[in-house]
Amino acid sequence: MNAKKTNGGVRTDVVVIGGGATGCGLAWDLALRGIDVALIERGELASGTTGRFHGLLHSGARYVVTDPVTAEECYQESVVLRRIAKGPVEETDGLFVFGDGDDAGYLEQWRVGCRRAGIPIAEIPMREARLREPALAPCITKAFVVPDAVCNSFALCASLGRSAQSQGAQLFTYHRCNGIDMKDHRVTGVNLTDVRTGTSRKINCKIVVIAAGPWSARIAKAAGVELSLDLVRGAMIAFKGSAVKGPVSRLQPPGDGDIILPRGRVSIAGTTSVVTNDPDDRRVDNWELDLVKTQIDAFVIGVAGAQMAHSWAGVRSLYRGRSQEREASNTNFRSTDPHSWSRDFAVLDHESRDGVSGLVSIVGGKLTSFRLMAERTADVVCRSLGNSEHCRTAITGLI
Ligand SMILES: Cc1cc2nc3c(=O)[nH]c(=O)nc-3n(C[C@H](O)[C@H](O)[C@H](O)COP(=O)(O)OP(=O)(O)OC[C@H]3O[C@@H](n4cnc5c(N)ncnc54)[C@H](O)[C@@H]3O)c2cc1C
């Protein structure tokens, strides 16, 4: 059943705030379970972090040593997404490369981590690796094929939006959520502005889910709820030409400028990790461009001299997940290096957490894990609405 128009505006069961991969995935999941849902996005779908990401559908190999829970989830989700999102996902596979001077101890930990996470990797002879990726630098001595892939996040969100609408979801793009209405600590709806016309409207609902990536804390605050998210900006550069045929990652602990991948007629290199307090931070500083070029050029030659087509930045919102909460409670210390901060995600039910009933947030995660994030959130929403339908997004192809 669709969201319905009433005299006062629109009425629905669930409002999802945020039209990135997570919010679109959630609208799709809820609609498939027969729930009335409206998605609110202040811009176009994928106009937030999702449209500014690097483009890698992670096999999980990048995180096996530092963030094994995320690694395992990424691998499982990448397998599902290759099946259900055939249009947006390009099945390239990828290479992890190891060179002179790299840490042999880390290489061993990485092999063990991949095995534990169930991620299939295969070392190939360097001759074969250089045929595959002719621009590999001479210092590279080992290469491993991993099931990485490339994902077009705009096509993905368009597909999720279409699929959600086909099941009755309502999409309100170019609508900004200004606040969450509440009565007696219970959510009653949201108020919105159509940013193109300036018109205000209300949607009455039983549950609001905040899926607004790095903007989530601001929206939650308006409902009197504190979310502590770490915002970390990252810069990307698109170089003209095809420097690589598939994603190539440096086999080292996650750091700056260690992944390059092909997207159409450009190659995208990234990224950096700069702590910020502004979800709209779009800066790309010169030192970031220089660092990414130098780091990538050390394993894929010619990048530093290639013509730059474009550069941009996006803001990650990282949640102090299960692994780092444990780390913090054990040692009272958290690494100051944002590369090592967890990519874990969490569904926060603000009724049990903060005494606000009908409010849920989904925080942290990766684009690669968006479907699982949506599934876990939809489970919480369904329990609250007394809906016993199971998730079907892992077995339903996107349209
Ligand atoms: C530099 C960088 C590189 C990355 N690379 C990768 C990668 O290669 N692979 C990978 O898997 N992940 C990657 N990620 C992580 C990934 O991009 C994010 O985890 C994911 O895109 C987050 O999606 P989201 O839907 O949760 O948030 P977002 O995409 O940010 O969506 C939130 C939406 O909420 C909307 N919004 C905000 N406020 C309001 C409001 N008041 N009213 C209505 N709408 C509102 C915003 O416009 C936005 O569209 C990268 C992230 C960064 C920053």
Image (spheres, rainbow, N blue to C red):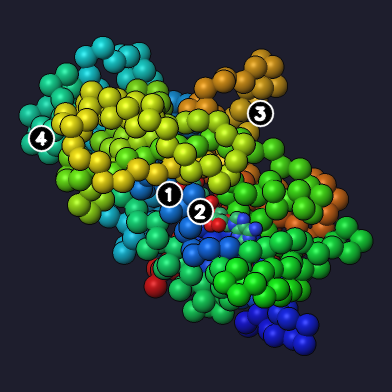
| Residue drawn at 66 percent across, 22 percent down | 328
Asked if the residue under mark 2 is in contact with the one under mark 1, i.e. CB atoms within 8 Å, the reply is yes
Q: Disc 4 vs disc 2: Cβ atoms closer than 8 Å?
A: no
- Which of marks 3 and 1 precedes in the sequence? 1
Dot 4: what SS? loop
The amino acid beneath tag 2 is: Gly
Percent x, y of residue 379: 64, 59
Determine which residue is flagged by label 1: 52
Up the image or down, 73 lies above or below 65; here it is below
Q: Identify residue type, mark 1.
A: Arg
Residue 392 in the image: x percent, y percent? 51, 66
Quarter of the figure with the N terminus: bottom right
The quarter of the displayed image where residue 186 is located: bottom right
* Label 4 crowd bin: few (<14), some (14–19), many (20+), radius 10 Å: some
Name the residue that disc number 2 marks: 48
How far apart are the two marked residues, 4 and 2, measured between alpha carbons?
Answer: 35 Å
* Label 4 or label 1, whichever comes before in sequence order: 1
Instruction: Please give the residue where the numbered disc 4 appears in the rendered image.
Output: 134
Which residue has dot 3 on it?
A: 325
Badge 1: how crowded within 10 Å, few (<14), some, or many (20+)? many
Q: Residue sitting at 75 percent across and 57 percent down?
A: 359
Q: Quadrant of residue 5?
A: bottom right
Disc 4/disc 1 C-alpha distance (Å): 28 Å
- Would you identify the image quadrant in which residue 183 lies? bottom right
Q: Confirm if mark 1 falls within 8 A of ligand 1.
A: yes
SS of the residue at dot 2?
Answer: loop
Question: Does any atom of ligand 1 lie closer than 8 Å to the CB of label 2?
Answer: yes
How far, Cα to Cα, is label 1 from label 3?
28 Å
In this view, the residue in front, 14 or 316, is 316
As shown in the figure, which amino acid type bears the numbered disc 4? Pro
